[in-house]
Image (tube, rainbow, N blue to C red):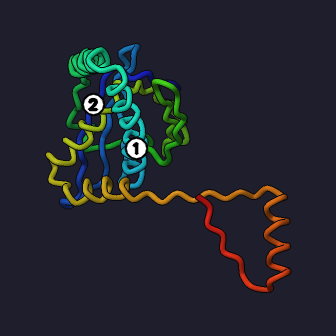
Amino acid sequence: MQNTLKGFNTAVIKHEDHFLALLLKVKSQNDICQTYYLQAPQLADLCLILQSRINLVAQRISEEGDTYKEKLNNINEIIIAETPEIEISEIEEPDSGQRITSLTFAPGNASAKIVAVLQNKKTIIFNIDDTQVDALSVAIQQALINSNENDLMQNIYFDMKYLMLYTVDLSKEKIFHINNIFKKTGKPLYIKTI
């Protein structure tokens, strides 16, 4: 199932005053609303995805200036007008089948697809335009602030500043070359690639 987002809303669900999940209610282009739940690891993944797109938006603002800013303002007004209402039952009795267990990111030029696998084994694809990512990020942050989840918010956003990235090239040529060096020196080889 694919959802092109039109509006969204967020809330924090707590159990015994501890973060349990973030409720994300989305309204798609066909005006159907769906509620999903993200626990801390999946929430961190979503925030990381949004942050990568926010960086592209900042780049477009510097390139296109006021034209792009005006487009962002217009989209934000639409998002506000299309914000779905969260029912109290969605917070008090969350549907565990709607819990997002994993997220996969497929970037595009001006939008992104986020593939979510749910607890009930269904797969949902969210199409998020880059003009919407800032509003969604703010909605998540505001939900965490309103529920006094400052530590969780700090941990999520702190991890984004120091993300470690490792790559491995397993082509045959390099393995052969590494093996030859190891055989000649007889010492372990440490390679740092930049």
Which residue is at 22% across, 17% downward? 77
Quarter of the figure with the C terminus: bottom right
* Residue 5 to residue 59: above or below: above
* Residue 71 to residue 60: above or below: above
Q: Secondary structure at mark 2?
A: helix
In front here: 64 or 125? 64
Looking at the image, residue 105 sits to the left or right of residue 76; the answer is: right
Which residue is at 49% across, 42% downward? 118
Q: Residues within 10 Å of mark 1 (few under 14, many from 20)?
A: some
* Amino acid type assigned to the residue bearing label 1 in the image: Leu
Q: Position of residue 3 (x, y in %)?
A: 45, 24
Which residue is at 39% across, 59% downward? 162
Which residue is at 85% across, 80% downward? 183
User: What residue does disc 1 label?
Assistant: 46
Q: Secondary structure at mark 1?
A: helix
Q: Position of residue 74 (x, y in %)?
A: 25, 15
Return the mark for residue 135: 2
Q: Which circle's residue, 1 or 2, is located before the other in the chain? A: 1
Q: Position of residue 51 (x, y in %)?
A: 37, 42
